[in-house]
Image (cartoon, rainbow, N blue to C red):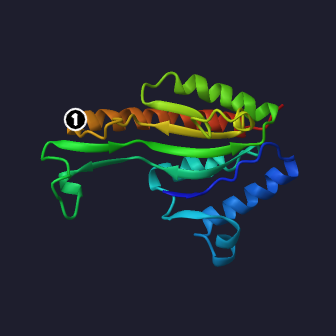
């Protein structure tokens, strides 16, 4: 997982958006050089997960959006842990963590249409979610900000382990969602006539 902490702006111009996009993408794709770390707060030094790298790259090609965090989701089994302990999944169990992508839009008509279509797609999948960030706030100045958190692959809220077959089913659904999400992105990358 790789990302940057967000500073929430209530309103920015297209020029500010483009500048911020360039800074964030430079940081995400250059592993956070020293000078970038002074400008942006890093909370994870990892790479963009292989499972979402292609989606993240395509999303960042959209002129109205850029990603700020990405995780592909993970199925953890007892065999996949180097040093299992008492908290590790049992032999026939798995711990499943959903994947997610956080992103900012520029509030354009095109970005609003993209969000509308993405919400429709999310509603077709039990394990998919889309939140307007920051979530769980009553502060009026943060309502309707162009920051979103997309989740795919249901995670048990109590972090209980599940059977390996259930985890496999969740992985199948996650991959199906990602396939449909890629189609949506591709539509928005097509030149408008």
Seen from the viewer's position, the closer of residues 144 and 71 is 144
State left or right for residue 183 relative to residue 169: right
The quarter of the picture where the C terminus appears is top right
Residue 104 rendering spot, x and y as whole percentages: 69, 45
Residue carrying label 1? 165
Secondary structure of residue under mark 1:
helix
Residue 10 lies in what quarter of the image? Answer: top right
User: Residue at image x 67%, y 25%?
Assistant: 116
User: Residue at image x 14%, y 42%?
Assistant: 92
* Number of marks in picture: 1
Residue 4 rendering spot, x and y as whole percentages: 60, 58
The outermost residue toward the bottom is 34
State left or right for residue 75 relative to residue 46: left
Is 106 located above or below residue 192 in the figure? below
Residue 144 lies in what quarter of the image? Answer: top right
User: Residue at image x 63%, y 47%?
Assistant: 58
Seen from the viewer's position, the closer of residues 60 and 84 is 84
User: Residue at image x 19%, y 48%?
Assistant: 89
Residue 33 rendering spot, x and y as whole percentages: 63, 75
Residue 117 rendering spot, x and y as whole percentages: 64, 26
State left or right for residue 7 relative to residue 192: left
Is 21 located above or below residue 169 in the figure? below
Is 152 located above or below residue 63 in the figure? above
Answer few, some or many: residues within 10 Å of disc 1's Cα (few below 14, many 20 plus, some between 14 and 19). few
């Amino acid at each position: 997982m790789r990302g940057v902490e967000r500073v929430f702006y209530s309103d920015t111009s297209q020029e500010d958006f483009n500048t911020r996009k360039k800074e964030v993408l430079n940081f995400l794709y250059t592993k956070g050089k020293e000078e970038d770390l002074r400008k942006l707060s890093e909370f994870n030094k990892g790479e963009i997960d292989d499972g979402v790298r292609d989606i993240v790259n395509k999303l960042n090609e959209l002129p109205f959006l850029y990603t700020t965090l990405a995780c592909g989701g993970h199925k953890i089994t007892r065999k996949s842990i180097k040093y299992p302990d008492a908290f590790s999944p049992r032999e026939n169990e798995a711990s499943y963590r959903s994947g997610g992508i956080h992103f900012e839009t520029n509030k354009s008509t095109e970005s609003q249409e993209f969000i509308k279509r993405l919400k429709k797609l999310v509603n077709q999948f039990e394990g998919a979610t889309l939140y307007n960030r920051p979530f769980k706030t009553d502060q009026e100045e943060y309502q309707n900000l162009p920051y979103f958190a997309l989740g795919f692959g249901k995670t048990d809220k109590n972090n209980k382990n599940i059977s390996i077959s259930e985890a496999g089913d969740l992985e199948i659904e996650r991959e199906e969602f990602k396939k449909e999400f890629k189609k949506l992105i591709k539509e928005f990358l097509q030149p408008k006539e």
